Image (tube, rainbow, N blue to C red):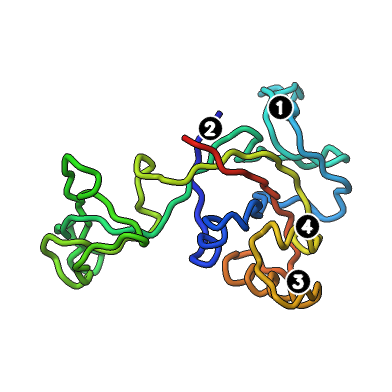
Amino acid sequence: MKERSILFNTEMVKAILEGRKTMTRRVIKPQPHEGCGHIRVEYFFPTKVDRHGEEYPGAKIFGAYSDDGEWGCKCPYAVGDYLYLKEPHYRYGSWVRNGLTKTGSQKWQFEAYIAWSDDFNIRYMDNPPDIITPNSCRGFGWYKRSPLFMPKKYARHWYVITGVRAERVQDISWADIKEEGIESDHMDEHKDMCYFHSLWNTVSNCKWESNPWVWVIEFKVVSK
């Protein structure tokens, strides 16, 4: 089983920590060709071609393939794999010089101070330090850091993947919108769909209007 990090925006982090979000969608890369027909998600043997031009079955992978046999790709997620949530956080450390840019400007790199206690290594948004140092400073202090830079060893929230399928993003059902963590007071399917449409366009490079194929990933909380 693999262990992978997963990122969400602030709103979705809140939803996932409150237990409202148990599903996410990620764009399939590369996208299937138009008119490829039904797409299956399962273990399969991709077709390989040797140096003589002869086809042969490759090693078994988990992924998606089209019924016409013209397209297939490996899925980076599989049932049973673990996900850990990367969170915004604070690290104690300082900024050090790290060479120059192509234009000759000074580059800086954050260097975390490693202490014997994790309480002095990292703080989370629900337990901020008393003093937060602005990024414009370079000395030692507590700095706010992006989720991208959170080490796996400090992950507090783990999940296991319980299901994977492929579909067009516009085929999402109202029930799945709820599983995606969308909170609604109006119980209006059209309004909820429009809200998810807008949210998708803020977090994805493949816009809703292009209706990309996506991996639909279901998950649940586990102890790790």
Residue 135, located in which quarter of the rendered image?
bottom left
Label 2 vs label 4, nearer the camera: 2
Residue under circle 2?
2
Label 2 crowding class (10 Å Cα cut-off): few <14, some 14-19, many 20+? few
- Secondary structure category for the residue under label 2: loop
Q: CA distance from mark 2 to mark 1?
A: 28 Å
Could you say which disc has been placed on residue 203 in the image? none
Query: Which residue is pictured at 59% across the width and 38% down the height?
Result: 160
Q: Which residue is mark 4?
A: 168
Left of 96 or right of it: where is 88?
Answer: right
Q: Are marks 3 and 4 in contact (CB under 8 Å)?
A: no
- Could you tell me which residue is drawn at 85 percent across and 49 percent down? 36
The residue that disc 1 covers is: 49
Circle 3 or circle 2, nearest the eye: 3
Which of the marked residues, 3 or 1, is nearer the chain's N terminus?
Answer: 1
- Neighbor class of circle 3 (other Cα within 10 Å; few <14, some 14-19, many 20+) is some
| Lower sequence index among marks 3 and 4 | 4
Residue 61, compared with residue 210, is above or below; it is above
Q: Nearer the viewer, residue 53 or 6?
A: 6
Numbered circles on residues, count: 4
Nearer to us of marks 4 and 1 is 4
Spot occupied by residue 69 in the image (x, y as percentages of width and height): 83, 37
Between the residue at mark 3 and the residue at mark 1, the CA separation in whole angstroms equals: 44 Å
| Lower position in the chain sequence, tag 3 or tag 2 | 2
Q: Nearer the viewer, residue 213 or 55?
A: 213
Query: Label 2 is placed on what type of residue?
Result: Lys
Residue marked by disc 3: 193
149 is higher (above) or lower (below) than 118:
below
Tell me which numbered mark, 4 or 1, is placed earlier along the sequence.
Answer: 1
